Amino acid sequence: MIALVFLLIGLFSAGNNEVYDNSCVQHQSEKIVNGNSLSGIFESGGCVKVLYRFYDCNQIKKEDIVVYNQTGNKNPIIKIVKAVPGDKLSFIDNGSKLVINGMPVTNSRRDEYFFAETKMLALYANDYPTIPRNTYLILGNNTRGTFDSSHFGLVDGDGIIGKVIACG
């Protein structure tokens, strides 16, 4: 009965005392994770639930896990939002350690992100040291890089098509 009440008013809790507006979710579906980009959070073969159009009425926040419709990729990808508009993007240690707002960026295990090849993100750091409006840095949980912003750069918020949560 309580779950029905929350469904009717369109709100749900993320488990961290935050309440989200769920009324804009167009539909949701369970998907099987394919790949190890988010290993430590979601394992390959595991189940996730995608809340499509969630961000039509909720703000994209750091550490949200999102599904992104990456151009040229027939399947959307799942990544973690590591920086949002207004954040300061830079690199230290000869351009290999990613820093946001002066602090090294870490994954779910608190390991720092290091990139041997940062050409794409380095261009953004030089040209846009402050992340522009409706633009996001999305990364996998692998600190040495995956197919994420370390390869294709910052992403437009319009390509983020939903929020990802655990099945269950």
Image (tube, grey):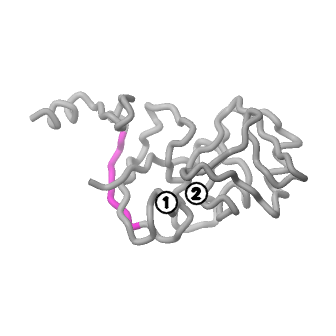
Q: Is residue 68 left or right of residue 88?
A: left
Residue 148 magenta-highlighted: no
Q: Which residues are magenta?
A: 25-32
The three-letter code of the residue at mark 2 reads Asn
Which residue is found at the position 36% from the left and 53% from the top? 166
Image coordinates of residue 80 in percent, x first then y, are 56, 49
- Of residues 25 and 115, which is closer to you in this image? 115
Q: Is the residue under label 2 in contact with that under label 1 (CB below 8 Å)? A: yes
Question: Which element is circle 1 on?
Answer: loop
Q: Tell me which numbered mark, 1 or 2, is placed earlier along the sequence.
A: 1
Count of picture labels: 2
Residue 141's disc number: 2
113 versus 146 height, above or below: above
Which residue is found at the position 46% from the left and 35% from the top? 56
133 versus 116 height, above or below: above
Magenta stretch mostly in which secondary structure? Answer: strand
Q: Which quarter of the figure has residue 116?
A: bottom right
Q: Is residue 34 left or right of residue 107?
A: left
Residue 13's disc number: none
Image coordinates of residue 28 in percent, x first then y, are 33, 51
Q: Which quarter of the figure has residue 147?
A: bottom right
85 versus 145 height, above or below: above
Tell me the residue that label 1 is attached to: 40
Q: Residues within 10 Å of mark 2 (few under 14, many from 20)?
A: many
- Of residues 120 and 36, which is closer to you in this image? 36
Q: Residue furthest left?
A: 1
Identify the image quadrant of the N terminus. top left
